[in-house]
Image (tube, grey):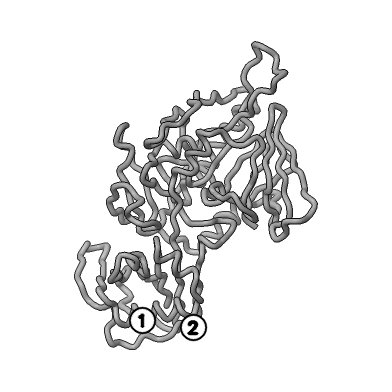
Amino acid sequence: MEIVLVAAVETGALVAMVDERANRRNIRLSDNDDDASNISVAVPERLAVLLRNGYSCVPVALSEGLDIRLNTAARAVRYGVNGVEVWAAPSRSLHTNHTVYKADAVLVTLPLGVLKASAPPSAVAFNPPLPDWKSQAIQRLGFGNLNKVVLCFERIFWDPTANLFGHVGSTTASRGELFLFWNLYKAPVLLALVAGEAACVMENVSDDVIIGRCISVLKVGELSQEFSLETSLVFPQTIFGNQVVPQPRESVVTRWRADPWARGSYSFVAVGSSGSDYDLLAAPVAPPAPPNYPPGTPSPQPRVFFAGEHTIRNYPATVHGAFLSGLREGGRIADQLCGSPYAPPTMPTTVPSSTGVSSSNNTATTNNNNNNNTNSNTTGTSSAP
């Protein structure tokens, strides 16, 4: 069966050249979601696709016919040689009776920020704990913060042919503050981006303060620049100068770092990490053999599988990367349950402290939806409501 996937690539993507010791494979880093000191070498990539009806239409279509439990948070994953148990509870309550879902395998699509977390309400406990090679890769790989400010105006007061407007902060700390304003064509809407340290700072102030700052930047521009994707021209100027910039009639501000079900936006190759960590995050985990395991018996099969944008080496930080990783893991689980078991790579008992450990595991993709299905042989976990 041939599957054709139209990639909806996040705007302002970066292509980073990492994994210098190996074959210099490309790792895509979405937008500018962390401080430059934490990111490897990067080259701008100019590719953007907007979905007409918004991204919500994608999970809505993919979830048709599935038994999805909303407002249900995974609290614990217990796995052994005979299968898995996922302990879940209402997402807004920490003190309640748990519902236990039993299955042959579990597909974990928790965001990387949640995997890094160790405190309630979003932290998920694994029993037995994940092996060192997995937990260390989780901690090495970076998880950035990119927030968006949607400004809806009564009318278009900017050049409707311009793709975007850029803004350069006057200090290092403000480098990621409102650095891009995207023009959503045919609608009086601007989409502003806030990244890195500035994104963390803005999560602690009110929407009114953030909107006021947006208007100030649009009016004054500071050391602003306007970018044209068609001509690749960059020339300094204020954004709108003394032109009247009206107050938006409606606005939306995201705070992904503060969201307990996300704890950030996208993965990136942090200093000390490498593309190999994506492979390690994609590798399934098998339970340790119990003391009474019969001698000569094959090693236990993997029971815990992983998918998401942080598990696909070639397409991290993208929606299509997450989707493809789900296809990868679905095939891997089907192979195991249908009699063609996946052979996990041999993992070292210790992980070097440099840039990570390479894995022979093939990478693919997955989506971070919370699918808790009690009527099948696999169950998905997500802490998102």
Question: Local crowd at mark 1 within 10 Å, few (<14), some, or many (≥20)?
Answer: few
Residue drawn at the location 51% of the way across and 41% of the way down: 325
Above or below for 11 versus 250: above
Residue drawn at the location 40% of the way across and 63% of the way down: 197
Residue drawn at the location 25% of the way across and 71% of the way down: 225
Is label 2 in a helix, a strand or a loop? loop
Q: Amino acid at mark 1?
A: Ser
Above or below for 321 versus 70: above
Determine if residue 292 is in view. yes
Q: 29 or 210, which lies in front?
A: 210
Look at mark 1 in the image and give the residue it sits on: 216
* Quadrant hosting residue 339: top right
Determine if residue 48 is in view. no
Is label 1 in a helix, a strand or a loop? helix
Label pair 1/2, CB-CB below 8 angstroms: no
Q: Amino acid at mark 2?
A: Arg
**200 left or right of 298 in image:** left
What percent of the width, then of the height, locates residue 321?
46, 46
Using the image, tell me which numbered label, if any, was put on residue 344: none
**354 left or right of 341 in image:** left
What percent of the width, then of the height, locates residue 133?
50, 33
Question: Local crowd at mark 2 within 10 Å, few (<14), some, or many (≥20)?
Answer: few
What percent of the width, then of the height, locates residue 141?
44, 44
What percent of the width, then of the height, locates residue 135?
53, 39
Using the image, tell me which numbered label, if any, was put on residue 249: 2
| Label tally | 2
Q: CA distance from mark 1 to mark 2?
A: 16 Å
Residue drawn at the location 63% of the way across and 17% of the way down: 298
